[in-house]
Image (cartoon, rainbow, N blue to C red):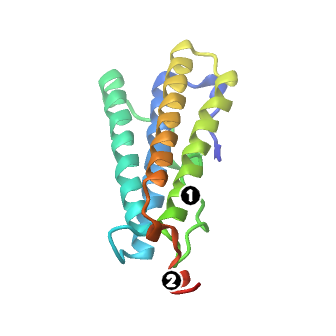
Amino acid sequence: MTTRVDLSKITLMDALDLASLIEVEACQRYELFAAQLGRRDPIDAASVFRSMAINEKKHGDQLAERRRALFGDKPARVKLDDVFDIEAPDFGAPTWNMSAFKALQMALSSERKAFEFYDEALPGVSQPDVIALFRELREEEGEHIQMVEALIEKLPPEAMVDIQDEGVD
């Protein structure tokens, strides 16, 4: 979970670009995982990853729109290469046989990583508008944590079983 951006000197525009790119990276990773696993049934790991990709894209689009409203088409100084694994799930985490439950646990871990990023970044940020944004984003990530926890609670028993475990006593 890293960024090459000096958070002590970050502007609001840079912070919005950073936050948007964090969501883009997570979306791309979830899309990759969904494509790699392929959908087997309505409640499987690929479906979880597809759903998470949609959520990350929506959040990223909202941040990008907010940035455009404030700063227009001013060129971004923060690039996707400046972001690594802040919210995106770990590359090696999915397995071909993982259950929807394990996919949601992975998503929960990713949302917690994003919450921790904003929480740990706050003491190093000096711009009041960036502090306010990071607090807002930390709160949103907290809401996302609760959302994923609620999804885990509602899973049917069959969604807890890895593919290789089916039929095993």
Q: 13 or 43, which is in the foreground? A: 43
Q: Position of residue 7 (x, y in %)?
A: 63, 29
Q: Earlier in the sequence, mark 1 or mark 2?
A: 1
User: Which residue is at the far front?
Assistant: 169
Question: Are the residues flagged by discs 1 and 2 in contact, CB closer than 8 Å?
Answer: no
The picture quadrant where one finds residue 119 is: top right
Real-space CA distance between mark 1 and mark 2, rounded to the nearest whole angstrom: 21 Å
Residue 108 in the image: above or below residue 158: above
Residue drawn at 50 percent across, 80 percent down: 163
Task: Say if residue 77 shows up in the picture.
Answer: no
Query: Which mark's residue is nearer the viewer, 1 or 2?
Result: 2
| Kind of residue indicated by mark 2 | Glu
User: Which residue is at the far top?
Assistant: 128
Q: Secondary structure at mark 2?
A: loop
Task: Say if residue 87 shows up in the picture.
Answer: yes
Q: Is residue 77 left or right of residue 91?
A: left
Q: Is residue 73 left or right of residue 131?
A: left
> Which residue in the protein does label 1 denote?
106
Around disc 1, counting alpha carbons within 10 Å, would you say few (fewer than 14), some (14 to 19), or many (20 or more)?
A: many
Q: Position of residue 111 (x, y in %)?
A: 54, 45
Residue drawn at 57 percent across, 19 percent down: 131
Q: Position of residue 88 (x, y in %)?
A: 54, 53
Q: Secondary structure at mark 1?
A: helix
Residue 75 in the image: above or below residue 53: above
| Kind of residue indicated by mark 1 | Met
The picture quadrant where one finds residue 169 is: bottom right
Q: 144 or 165, which is in the foreground? A: 165
On residue 166, which mark appears? 2
